[in-house]
Structure formats: structure tokens, C-alpha cells
Image: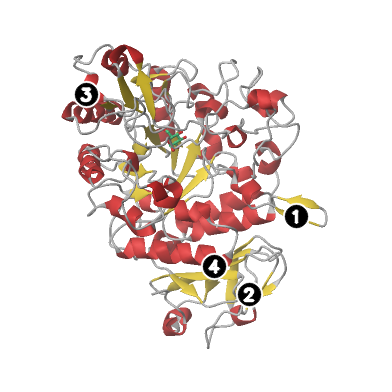
């Protein structure tokens, strides 16, 4: 595939300008009729994503884990890294998905779960057989503390689980699990573990996948002496916002050598990418995970998706992301995924006529697709799917994340919204947005996403690294995207009432052209940016007349 990547450093890495679409395979489409989504179902719906004129127009798909799993953590507990779970199909189906996606111009990324395996993985079954088994040291074992309790005070990432240690009666030691007790942590200090996991990567890279989303990489480094966390940093969310390392069960400096190893394997294949879910909340510490261009290519931005719906919060994220670019990394934008309440729900606001989940989802679509960096969309986000409130008997996930994982809503005129001919594994609501209706409506959120992604693929300004934020009204976040003699100006009104944007630049050319607006402005309309009044919740993309704004650059605030 050819790439034009003007205005940056002359690189041609496809992932920089890509839009990646996350599929949660259990919930996308069920072709086999057992109530669970599967790989054949995804294949049948590839046209929704790419390769046709009315496709959404993403560049890559990322599949949450498809490996054999007892599904205690819904696939993030891997029992065999080189087998496809029977619910999803077979290795042949995976091969077919890879080749059919590629023939539509879609790259394929898999989830790689290095920190732990399922307790039903053969390696762990061997490890727990005896203290002398050759797999024993593939996991993290420790003797009880003198009072017989767990070896230290480390907690699971899941609040309901409590301690990160479980006692194994037959062998008289505790094993570490950063998540559920059915997900024992691998011991990455052991070279045999590294070699085996590198083999797993090669197994899939050899089958033609384009890279991995790496699950929880910050967990791979932990204190070699298994010392307690300081009592005031037991809560890891708080702890990882601090610029210190008084908590010891993650983000240990040892992680960086491990990641360089993963990168070497990846780089031994052309054009592959590693994207890390680095759950460290301090932006500078998170930045370390790019290494010197020799660790992760991309790092998810926990700050961005944790933002409240406020202009200054996203303006600050924009500045942090610009710092990532200046440090030689490349930022990412996502607002939803399988671990987060969907942003259409999170950012919904009450109006006189009820709960509005749509207006801010539209403005968010503009934000996600126009900032410099790699964009990630979560299945259903393109139609504005919301969290689905579930009756208690359906709550299965160890961390309560079922509401954002419900089946894709293809067509409410069909049973189970077109997801499955059978009873779906999680319920589908009675009504809501669906692909069929939105496909036919030029004003739908889906049509907006199609337009924005077309712009993102084709407009030189959106294929560059150029970015500077612009002084405005405090409720407006505006930035410009210059490249060569062209400039786009993006402005988003975070208020539910109209706002004069108050763009602070003199001699602004009055003849800007509307490219996309989530409000009522038709594309092609000429407007004067200095007089700009944004509609409530409006996201607006303007093209400035060639050459004019560039010469005004000093009047605008670059953000450093
Ligand atoms: C990551 C995944 C999450 C999973 C956890 C353990 O945070 O995104 O879904 O539960 O790791 O693998």
C-alpha cells in the first residue's frame, strides 16, 4: 500500500495515519448460530469496515483475544496461544479472515496477552504439579509470609478480587495474579518465558497479521524482591498518577528490556506495529514506553479517555500529545474500549427533552479523527451505541464491564438486532441505533464518521504531524493542522449553548470554507472565522484559504 505522509519526517509507517477499529469478537456477529460472535461473522461484515465506497473506511481491525480460553476474563485468560477458541471458529477461519481483510485493504491486529495465562494453560498445569517441575519458574511463586498470609500487600487490578496472591495447597506456596486467580502472572525474568512468548508472536506474524495490541505491558516489570507497596500507594490508579515508584508490582524499569525484546521480534517482519495498553496515568512515565524508538510504536493514552467533557481537559491532552511527538513518539486517540463505559453514555447530557447521547458523540467523532495521531474506534461507536443496562443474571465479568460489551446492533428489523439467530450471550436492547437505518441516512452519526474518515485518509493536513492550539473562549477547544501552504482549523464547542469562538488572531482571512460540521452548516459554505459562533456541541472543520493562515502563525498560540 502506498502512503503519502507529507509534512512529517518523511516516514511511511502506515499506522501513523491509521484509524483502527476494535472488534470484541464475542459480540460482533454470530455466523454459527450459537449466540456467540465468531470469525466467520466478522468476515461476513468486513464490507461495513472497508473496501467498498460506502464502507466506514477504517484502515485496520484489532480483535480482542480469539485464543482458546475458559473465558473467566472473556479471552484475556489464554489457555492456548496458538489455537482459536471453539466459540470463534478455527485456525482456518483466522487465516481466511486475515486474507479477506487484506484483500479489502484492511490490516489485522491481534491482542497479545503477555502478563499472564489462564490457569488451564498447559504451562501452569505443569508449574503447579511440583516445586521441581521445569515449568515451575515460568510463573511467580513465593512462600507465605511468617504469619502464613500472602507474601506481600499487592492487590489485584480488579477491586472485587482483593489480594493478588492465591495459595496453592499441594505445593505450599502462593502464586501471583495481577487480575483474577485464574490468570497467574508469567515470570518474564525467566528467559524460557521470553523465548516461548516470542515464539507465540512469530506464530501469528507468520500467518500474516500486521501487529499486536499488547495487553497490560506495564505489568511485565515488577520488583524482583517482591517488596510491599508503600501503604499510601496501594491504590494503583492513584499511584500511577505520581511521578515516583513507591509501588512495586508494575512499571518496574525491568519492563523496558522486555519490551525491546518484543520490538525486535516485531521488527524482524516488515511494516508491523506494537500498540501498548500502558496503564500508567502519569503522562511522562507513560512516554517512557516508546523507548528510544525501540519499544512500543504506539501507547494508549489513559489521560485522553479519562477526560471529562471539558474543553480545557482535552486542550491539556492535546499539549501532552504534542510533547509525545516532540519526544519522538506518536500519540493515540480513543474514547471507548471493552474496559470503559462507552463514551456516548459517559458524555450523555440531560436536556429538556431527555438524555442526549448523540450531540457529544458527534463532536467527539470530530475530535477523534482530526488530532494528529492514530485513532481507535470501538465497534458500535460509529452508530453511537450506548452502554446497555443488564439484569443481574447477565453480569458475568469479574470487573463489571458487560454493559459496554453487548452485541453489535446491525438491524433492529431482524431478531437480536441482526447479531445472531439464537439467544445472544449478552442481551440486545429493544431499540437503539442500528447500522441499517444509519447507512441510509446522510445525517446519521455513521455518515458523519464516513465523511470524517474519508477526510482523514485524503486531506494532507490530517496526514501530517502539524498541530498548534489556538486561543479561544474557554468552552471551545480549537487547533489548527498546517502542512505546506494548507491549514485546517478544527473548533469544538464543549458547551450545550452557542459560543462565540473568539479565535484570537488578527488579520484572519474572512473566507474560510466549511469542510465538516456536526451542526447545521452545509459543507462548502464560506464563513469568517473571526466572527465564528459555534452551535451547541458543534464540532467544525474549516479550511483556511491557501497560504494566509501560515503567515499569521505567530499570532496563534503554539502550545509550548
Ligand atoms: C487489560 C484488558 C482487560 C483485561 C486485563 C487482563 O486491561 O484490556 O480487558 O481484563 O488486561 O488481561
Q: Is residue 129 above or below residue 228?
A: above
Q: Spatial distance from mark 1 to mark 4, Cα to Cα?
A: 21 Å
Relative to the observer, which residue lies in front, 521 or 63? Answer: 63
Quadrant of image for the C terminus: bottom left
Nearest to viewer (mark 2 / mark 3): 3
Residue 535 visible here: yes
Q: Is residue 330 above or below residue 296?
A: below
- Residue 550, x across and y down, in percent: 43, 79
Q: Spatial distance from mark 4 to mark 3, Cα to Cα?
A: 48 Å
Disc 4 residue crowd, few under 14, some 14–19, many 20+, Cα 10 Å: some
Relative to the observer, which residue lies in front, 121 or 335? Answer: 121
Q: Spatial distance from mark 2 to mark 4, Cα to Cα?
A: 28 Å
Q: Secondary structure at mark 2?
A: strand
Nearest to viewer (mark 4 / mark 3): 3
Q: Secondary structure at mark 3?
A: helix
Label number found at residue 526: 2
Residue bearing the label numbered 3? 137
Q: Mark 2 or 4 closer to N-term?
A: 4
Residue 528 horizontal side relative to residue 179, left or right: right
Ligand 1 resides in the quarter of the picture at top left
For the residues labelled 1 and 4, say whether their Cβ atoms are less than 8 Å apart: no
Nearest to viewer (mark 2 / mark 4): 4
Label number found at residue 350: 1
Residue bearing the label numbered 4? 312
Quadrant of image for the N terminus: top left
- Residue 343, x across and y down, in percent: 60, 48
Q: Spatial distance from mark 2 to mark 1, Cα to Cα?
A: 33 Å
Label number found at residue 218: none
Amino acid at each position: 500500500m502506498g502512503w503519502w505522509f507529507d509534512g512529517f519526517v518523511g516516514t511511511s509507517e502506515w499506522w501513523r495515519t491509521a484509524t483502527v477499529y476494535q472488534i470484541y469478537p464475542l459480540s460482533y456477529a454470530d455466523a454459527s448460530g450459537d449466540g456467540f460472535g465468531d470469525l466467520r461473522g466478522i468476515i461476513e461484515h468486513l464490507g461495513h469496515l472497508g473496501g467498498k465506497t460506502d464502507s466506514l473506511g477504517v484502515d485496520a481491525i484489532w480483535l480482542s483475544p480469539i485464543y482458546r480460553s475458559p473465558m473467566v476474563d472473556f479471552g484475556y485468560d489464554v489457555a492456548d496461544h496458538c489455537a482459536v477458541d471453539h466459540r470463534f471458529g478455527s485456525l482456518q477461519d483466522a487465516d481466511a479472515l486475515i486474507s479477506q481483510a487484506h484483500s479489502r485493504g484492511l490490516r489485522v491486529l491481534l491482542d497479545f496477552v503477555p502478563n499472564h495465562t489462564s490457569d488451564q494453560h498447559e504451562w501452569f498445569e505443569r508449574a503447579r504439579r511440583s516445586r521441581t517441575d521445569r515449568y515451575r519458574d515460568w510463573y511467580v511463586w513465593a512462600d507465605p509470609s511468617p504469619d502464613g498470609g500472602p507474601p506481600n500487600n499487592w492487590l489485584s487490578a480488579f477491586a472485587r478480587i482483593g489480594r493478588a496472591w492465591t495459595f496453592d495447597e499441594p505445593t505450599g506456596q502462593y502464586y501471583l495474579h495481577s487480575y483474577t486467580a485464574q490468570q497467574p502472572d508469567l515470570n518474564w525474568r525467566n528467559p524460557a518465558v521470553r523465548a516461548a512468548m516470542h515464539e507465540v508472536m512469530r506464530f501469528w506474524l507468520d500467518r500474516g497479521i500486521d501487529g499486536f495490541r499488547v495487553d497490560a505491558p506495564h505489568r511485565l516489570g515488577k520488583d524482583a524482591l517482591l517488596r510491599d507497596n508503600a501503604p499510601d500507594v496501594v491504590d494503583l490508579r492513584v499511584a500511577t498518577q505520581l511521578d515516583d515508584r513507591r509501588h512495586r508490582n508494575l512499571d518496574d524499569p525491568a519492563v523496558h528490556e522486555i519490551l525491546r525484546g518484543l520490538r525486535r521480534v516485531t521488527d524482524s517482519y516488515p511494516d508491523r506495529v506494537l500498540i501498548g495498553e500502558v496503564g500508567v496515568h502519569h503522562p511522562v512515565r507513560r512516554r517512557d514506553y516508546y523507548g528510544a524508538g525501540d519499544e512500543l510504536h504506539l501507547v494508549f493514552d489513559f489521560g485522553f479517555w479519562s477526560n471529562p467533557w471539558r474543553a480545557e481537559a482535552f486542550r491539556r491532552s492535546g499539549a501532552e500529545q504534542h510533547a509525545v511527538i516532540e519526544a519522538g513518539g506518536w500519540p493515540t486517540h480513543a474514547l471507548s474500549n471493552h474496559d470503559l463505559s462507552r463514551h456516548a453514555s459517559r458524555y450523555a447530557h440531560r436536556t429538556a427533552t431527555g438524555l442526549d447521547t448523540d450531540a457529544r458523540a458527534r463532536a467527539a467523532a470530530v475530535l477523534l479523527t482530526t488530532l494528529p495521531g492514530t485513532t481507535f474506534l470501538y465497534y458500535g461507536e460509529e452508530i453511537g451505541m450506548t452502554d446497555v443496562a443488564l439484569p443481574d443474571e447477565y453480569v458475568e465479568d469479574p470487573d463489571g464491564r458487560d454493559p459496554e460489551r453487548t452485541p453489535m446492533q446491525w438491524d433492529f428489523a431482524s431478531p437480536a438486532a441482526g447479531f445472531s439467530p439464537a439467544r445472544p450471550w449478552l442481551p440486545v436492547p429493544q431499540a437503539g441505533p442500528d447500522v441499517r437505518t444509519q447507512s441510509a441516512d446522510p445525517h446519521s452519526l455513521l455518515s458523519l464518521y464516513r465523511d470524517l474518515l474519508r477526510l482523514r485518509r485524503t486531506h494532507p493536513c490530517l496526514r501530517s504531524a502539524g498541530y498548534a492550539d489556538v486561543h479561544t473562549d474557554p468552552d471551545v477547544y480549537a487547533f489548527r493542522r498546517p502542512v505546506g501552504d494548507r491549514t485546517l482549523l478544527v473548533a469544538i464547542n464543549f458547551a450545550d449553548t452557542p459560543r462565540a469562538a473568539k479565535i484570537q488572531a488578527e488579520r484572519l482571512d474572512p473566507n474560510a470554507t466549511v469542510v465538516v460540521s456536526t451542526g447545521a452548516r452545509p459543507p462548502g459554505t464560506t464563513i469568517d472565522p473571526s466572527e465564528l459562533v459555534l452551535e451547541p456541541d458543534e464540532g467544525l472543520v474549516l479550511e483556511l484559504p491557501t497560504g494566509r493562515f501560515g503567515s499569521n502563525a505567530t499570532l496563534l498560540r503554539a502550545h509550548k
